[in-house]
Image (cartoon, grey):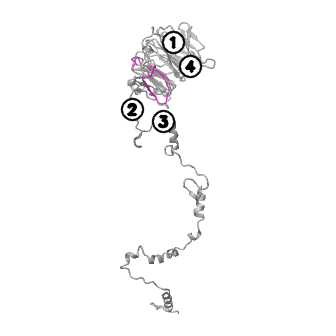
Amino acid sequence: MAIGGYDYEIKLYDFSGMDASLRSYRTFQPCESHHIKSVSFNLAGDAILIIPGSAQARIVDREGKNVLECVRGDQYIVDMAKTKGHCGMLNDGCWHPKLNYEFMTCSIDGSVRIWDINDRRKNKRIVKTKNAQGKKTEPNCCAYSRDGNYVVCGCEDGSIQLFDHRKQFINPCVLGRVCHMSGGITGVEFSFDGKTLASRGMDDTLKTWDLRNFKQCLASAGELYNRFPMTNCQFSPSDKLIITGTSTRPGVESGKLVVFEREGLVRKDELIISDSSVIRTLWHPKINQIFLSTGNGMVKAYYDMEKSLKGLTLCAMKPVKRKTAGSFAVEPQVFNPHALPMYKQERARKLSSIRAKERKDPVKSHRPELPLTGSTGAGGRLASHGSTLSSYIVRNIALQKVSEVKEDPREALLKHAEAAEKDPYWIAPAYKKTQPEPIFQSAIDDKNKDEQDEDFIAIPWKKQKQDE
């Protein structure tokens, strides 16, 4: 059994391998962040058709591996027959009852497409549903007849359109324009004898139709509150009963499974399922068991130990397997209280005490740098220079002594001249043997030189031009 829901997950169940705990053996998300609207097995049971909230249907095998993903159509083309696939969100889909390789999908783009699992490039055939004005209308649900010769579509405008699968899908062979009130048809189903069609609508009704005379319904049942576009109806394996689910509303706080007789739609029985709505129903014809999906994420199954075959009867009474001591290994722990600190193992403590200790450690807790408090700074970052950048600049730069800034560099060097002459350290010892005795010019020599410059008269080397 395969189950899909609004949590984007598909769960697979194996009745022969389960026990009373009813745990799934595989869970996966085939369509990422798109909820699942419909899930169905093909005739052979080796492929699962998944109808997500996107425009591309998927087919996976029994192990959840991807087999086929339908192509996406061009959304800028008006004629849906010219595109290779759907352009809008899918609403429903199902397999052909006789062919393992053929399936059908319907979308909000106003088309119903038939696909071949062996052709990945484009759809095989297309049906365009139209309303009374000739414009496209949205098909909410679709189904094959039991022999696969007819295709039926339940549309948003309340019409039911039936097409012959053996002919070209140009015009419907059977058409009912006002089968349900405006709001859409949520489910259509053929009877096993192929003479009757049941439809479920958003107008809180369930109706049966004779395919030979579609002008008026055979019977109608009301007061079946429905607020989900996936609520369907099902024929019993004996073809004498019809079941459907109801949704919760403010006055009624429980979802019900309602059973009707096929002739006249007489309400035979009803079961309160849960505090949530009953959305989809499945009465399997071979194992004779009823499966119901609810709005709170639960799936309920009903069976009879005498009339049901396989299915839940294989695992419902099987006890839950208990874990024994040999089913898991426990790692032994050696306590050595006198070991060296580097080899000493910490004893197991409460998680709360370990977290409290790590919280006090600034490295393990990744404590950020603490903010500044007070006027003297914190943590030695600004010391006594202040707690702000402006006070630091004022105290270290603006209030600096003027004498230290304007001191003559020549005088600063001459302060160390006497110490350098008495105890030379850098340059003088290196040239002590080869360097001559320095003779510096005195102030008296400078005065005599100035007097000689005044008495000196330069001899002109070129004759001057005489004045006229």
Image position, residue 427 (x, y; %):
41, 74
Quick one: SS at disc 2? loop
In the drawing, does residue 103 fall left or right of residue 294? left
Per the model, the C-alpha gap separating discs 3 and 1 is 68 Å
Kindly identify the residue that appears in the image at 42 percent across and 13 percent down: 310
Kindly identify the residue that appears in the image at 38 percent across and 80 percent down: 435
Residue 48 in sight from this viewpoint: yes
What kind of residue is marked 4? Ser
Task: Decide which of tag 4 and tag 1 comes sooner along the chain.
Answer: 1
Image: magenta residue range: 21-45
Per the model, the C-alpha gap separating discs 4 and 2 is 51 Å
Q: Which mark is residue 349?
A: 3
Residue wearing tag 4: 277
Disc 4 crowd, CA 10 A, few/some/many (<14, 14-19, 20+):
many
Task: Decide which of tag 4 and tag 2 comes sooner along the chain.
Answer: 4
**Which of the two residues, 225 or 412, is positioned nearer the viewer here?**
412
| In magenta stretch: residue 164 | no
Task: Decide which of tag 3 and tag 2 comes sooner along the chain.
Answer: 2
Q: Nearer the viewer, mark 4 or mark 1?
A: 4
Name the outermost residue toward the front. Answer: 338
Task: Decide which of tag 1 and tag 2 comes sooner along the chain.
Answer: 1
What kind of residue is marked 2? Pro
Q: Nearer the viewer, mark 1 or mark 2?
A: 2
Q: Nearer the viewer, mark 4 or mark 2?
A: 2
Q: Which mark is residue 332?
A: 2
Per the model, the C-alpha gap separating discs 3 and 2 is 17 Å
Image position, residue 89 (x, y; %):
50, 27
Q: Nearer the viewer, mark 3 or mark 4?
A: 3
Per the model, the C-alpha gap separating discs 3 and 4 is 48 Å
